[in-house]
Amino acid sequence: MKNTVRAAVTVVLTGAMLATAPAAFAQDAPRAGAQHAGVQSVLDQAVTQAGLPGAMAQIENGDSTWFGQAGTADLSTGRKLQPQDGFRIGSTTKTFVSTVVLQLEAEHKLSLDDTVEHWLPGLVDGNGYDGSEITIRQLLDMTSGISNYANAPQLADEFVGQAFLTNRFDSFTPRQLVEIAVASKPSFAPGAGWEYSDTNYVLAGLIVEKATGHSLAKEIARRITGPLHLSNTYEPTGDDTGIDGPHGRFYSKLMEQDPNAPFYDVTDLNPSWGFGAGDIISTDGDLITFFRALLQGRMLPPTQQREMFTMLDPGKNWIPGTTYGLGVASVNLSCGTVWGMGGAIDGSWSYTFGTRDGRHLLSTEVNGDWANGTFGSPVGVFTAELESEFCTPAPAATAR
């Protein structure tokens, strides 16, 4: 993530091709309380060593639930982070959008082999682009070659550094975002490479709207958040700059690399530049409920489930040790593989990953977009949490 806009709508994950069979982990029985001391230790270090304002995690393993936190949700009041606190989930939005697209395919309302030109005529055309050569599948798996609007010079000028504080309430339409993207040449011919591009999911969101006649927000609510009773999860509409429900404050260093750089409260912002790619608001508990249903095959028929979890190797174009499917990612840990997605937006980074059977999941969030010291970034914090939770043997039972 090289600029503020990319942080707003891009999440990170790369690595070797991995099998889709569930991995065997060190612990199978539910763990609770002090048995999650390793994860709690990482949360503490995120504050004391990485310098983040606050960090929280929720773990569900079978019928067992654990919540831990460190630091504060609000530097001005010192309030602790709470399980019900909402936050912007960044690119985990893509998993919701991909799920809706795959449901539409299962209903024969579209095909992953349909072209962008078929659904959005003339929108991706010229300057080296031909929308009739780009499929919906290539949008979802990041092989379209369409330039990432988050990297466009126009947005860098308006949203990087101090300029972000001035322009963070600016509004964009999805079509404007696509137009900004196609003003730059394609990164490669469709299907000839892999590159993370938020533009792909803006287009996917527009295709959902065209195929259904409803807003993307309405389809996500009708198909996912409603049936799963995710009462704290929603896609903002219009120019909604706030966060509904309980939440803390979110802080950003505006992508400055200096560990001594000041940070700013960026809780309120206009997420319209994240349409379909990074604008949803949720909670750790809701994300666990969603990913459990998704991993267990309760959101998609078997054919679409296989399509979603057919993983590609991004090579050096993403985070080491990860693969990418259709809006989902896998992380290769020292003991096996976990599945889910993560996201980043100004002031908020988050991960939700778990076992392939959906039984054991961890969802975590930090309310700052930096990490000093050995962690390197919030991804380093999250990886340490995953290793601790999924790869550390459970403590032996004590005889009484």
Image (cartoon, rainbow, N blue to C red):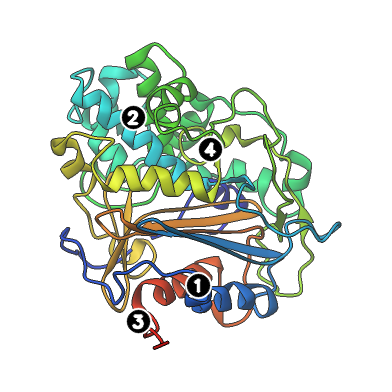
Q: Relative to 135, say whether 2 is above or below.
A: below
Q: Which residue is mark 3?
A: 393
- Which mark is drawn over residue 380? 1
x and y percent of residue 60 in the render?
42, 58
Q: Residues within 10 Å of mark 2 (few under 14, many from 20)?
A: many
x and y percent of residue 44 in the render?
63, 75
Q: Relative to 272, say whether 81 is above or below.
A: below
x and y percent of residue 52 in the render?
68, 68
Residue 145 visible in the snapshot = no
x and y percent of residue 304 in the render?
19, 36
- Going by the image, does 302 lie left or right of 64? left
Q: Amino acid at mark 1?
A: Gly
- Going by the image, does 348 lie left or right of 246? left
- Which mark is drawn over residue 100? 2
Q: Secondary structure at mark 3?
A: loop
CB within 8 Å, label 3 to label 4: no
Q: Which residue is mark 4?
A: 280
Q: Nearer the viewer, residue 372 or 41?
A: 41
Q: Residues within 10 Å of mark 3 (few under 14, many from 20)?
A: few
CB within 8 Å, label 1 to label 4: no
Q: Residues within 10 Å of mark 4 (few under 14, many from 20)?
A: many
